[in-house]
Amino acid sequence: MLNFHWSLRTEHRDGVLLDTVKSLESKGYTSALCQFQVHSGDPFIVAAHAASHTSTLKYMVALRPYALTPAYCKMQC
């Protein structure tokens, strides 16, 4: 069985983001990657918001090691 994953763009407007994750879930995707970008929303918030509107899609948060301290990441989990 193949698992399909998608890389989300965190600068999506709310309606576009929700449409995207609902579409991914209905098409059988396993997970979505939320990336940290300097000029975009917090990927933890984006993933949490999207997860509240889906039931089977999993979310991964990709962090850049120079952008966040380990202490900040620990507070988010």
Image (cartoon, rainbow, N blue to C red):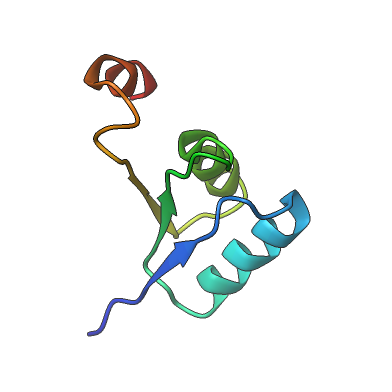
Q: Nearer the viewer, residue 75 or 2?
A: 75
Give the x, y percent position of residue 62.
33, 47
27 shown above or below 10: below
Give the x, y percent position of residue 17.
66, 57
Give the x, y percent position of residue 40.
58, 43
Q: Residue furthest bottom?
A: 1
46 shown above or below 77: below
- Quadrant position of residue 33: bottom left
Give the x, y percent position of residue 67.
34, 31
Q: Is residue 65 left or right of residue 47?
A: left
Q: Residue furthest right?
A: 15
* Quadrant (top left/top right/bottom left/bottom right) for the N terminus: bottom left
Q: Is residue 2 left or right of residue 58?
A: left
Q: Nearer the viewer, residue 25 or 9?
A: 9
Q: Is residue 55 left or right of residue 33?
A: right
The residue at 48%/40% (across/down) is 43
* Quadrant (top left/top right/bottom left/bottom right) for the C terminus: top left
The residue at 50%/60% (across/down) is 8
The residue at 42%/73% (across/down) is 29
The residue at 24%/35% (across/down) is 65
Q: How many marks?
A: 0
Q: Is residue 22 left or right of residue 75?
A: right
Q: Nearer the viewer, residue 7 or 64?
A: 64
